[in-house]
Amino acid sequence: MTALLEVEDLTVRFYTEEGVVTAVDGLSYRIEAGETFGVVGESGAGKSVAALSVLGLIDDPGRIERGEVRFKGEDLRSMTDAELRSVRGDEIAMVFQDARAALNPVYTVGEQIAETIEHHMGYDPAAARDRAVRLLDRVGIPEAGTRYSDYPHEFSGGMCQRATVAMALSCEPDLIVADEPTTALDVTVEARVLDLLADLADEFDVAVQLITHDLGVIAGTCDRAMVMYAGEAVERAPIEELYYDPKHPYTAGLMSAIPHVGDDRDRLQTIPGTMPDLIDVPSGCRFHPRCPFAEEACTRTDPALVDPENGEAATLETERAAACLEYTEGLTGGLDYSVEVDGETNERAEDDDGGEDDDGREDEGEEGGSDE
């Protein structure tokens, strides 16, 4: 059965005066109807560029060099601008990172939602207004009928984000791409917006591609997730397997940096170094300069995304995939990190395939230095 969204071998480059930036390199993933799919990684990993590419929103000096983006089996890249515009907002909607900037300051919030409804759904102005007011009320805007006539500067940051969620849902799309929708919000408002997004996804039976740099955000909201590093996918997995049995050292490093209630460490663990310059990426595995398990082979060979159980090349249908030489050539020292769940430690070594538990987890890798 065809997935709702299939992205295959997507490569996006930006041609700048400093050089060619390969922001996304050979990215492949799928999203099923009704599921919430997380895309996580540090700033500069290529998460937002990948999302914008799906909607055909890459402007000069950027170019989608190759790859396919199929939505309901239709190739979006082969569509005309007019055909693509009919898909955007109607069947695929986007919640942008900066909600206030995404709203036009010279139109009222309600007018902007109503305009979308009129354009894509053919409602008359009165019916569009009524639907916009109902949506504002549904996303938790108090006195929605009155606030319909307010301008974006009269909304708080959290209210602006709720309004953009209402706009995204206004035409009953099949997929919402949420690009770090809680970045500018404080932690309590962030939690409410994420809960709202999850509730509405269930209520409207809509799939969500949730982009974030925070692994804690995807833990309670996503069904599956993909970890990106330096423009590439380094791991894909169902969410519980990703947390309880990470297969890539970068994922383990991100996990170990998550703070936990009752954590008695003086400092959080960190991953040494920074994301590489995408104009001049390291040879071999792009993570090897920061990886505590890197060996000489890692500097020569760029590992492909494979099934970690058998080393076979991953396809769109492969549920579990990781890009590490451990699963193809084998590393001399293996991947020697552990996952601690409720005080019990599951070792990840060369001959151990890890484990799963039901709740509470903590990773202890060598990225930030363990007890020494």
Image (cartoon, rainbow, N blue to C red):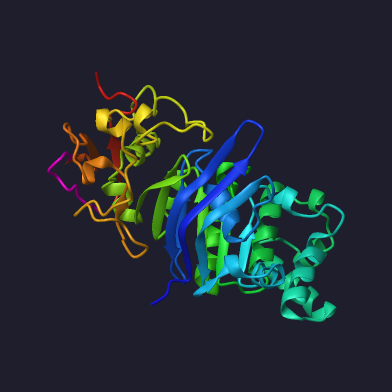
Task: Name which quarter of the figure residue 254 lies in.
Answer: top left
Q: Residue visible at 53% across and 38% down?
A: 43
Main SS of the magenta segment? Answer: loop
Whole-percent x, y for residue 107 in the image:
85, 59
Q: Is residue 111 visible?
A: yes
Task: Name which quarter of the figure residue 316 lies in.
Answer: bottom left
Left or right, residue 85 beside residue 304 = right
User: The magenta stretch spans which residues?
Assistant: 348-358
Is residue 352 on the magenta stretch? yes
Whole-percent x, y for residue 248 in the image:
31, 42
Q: Residue visible at 79% across and 69% down?
A: 115
- In this view, the residue in front, 357 or 309, is 309
| Up-down relation of residue 133 to residue 346 (above or below) | below
| Up-down relation of residue 84 to residue 162 (above or below) | below
Q: Quadrant of the C terminus?
A: top left
Q: Residue visible at 57% across and 64% down?
A: 176
Whole-percent x, y for residue 361 in the image:
30, 44
Is residue 354 on the magenta stretch? yes
Q: Quadrant of the N terminus?
A: bottom left
Q: Is residue 295 visible?
A: no
- Name the residue at the right extreme: 106
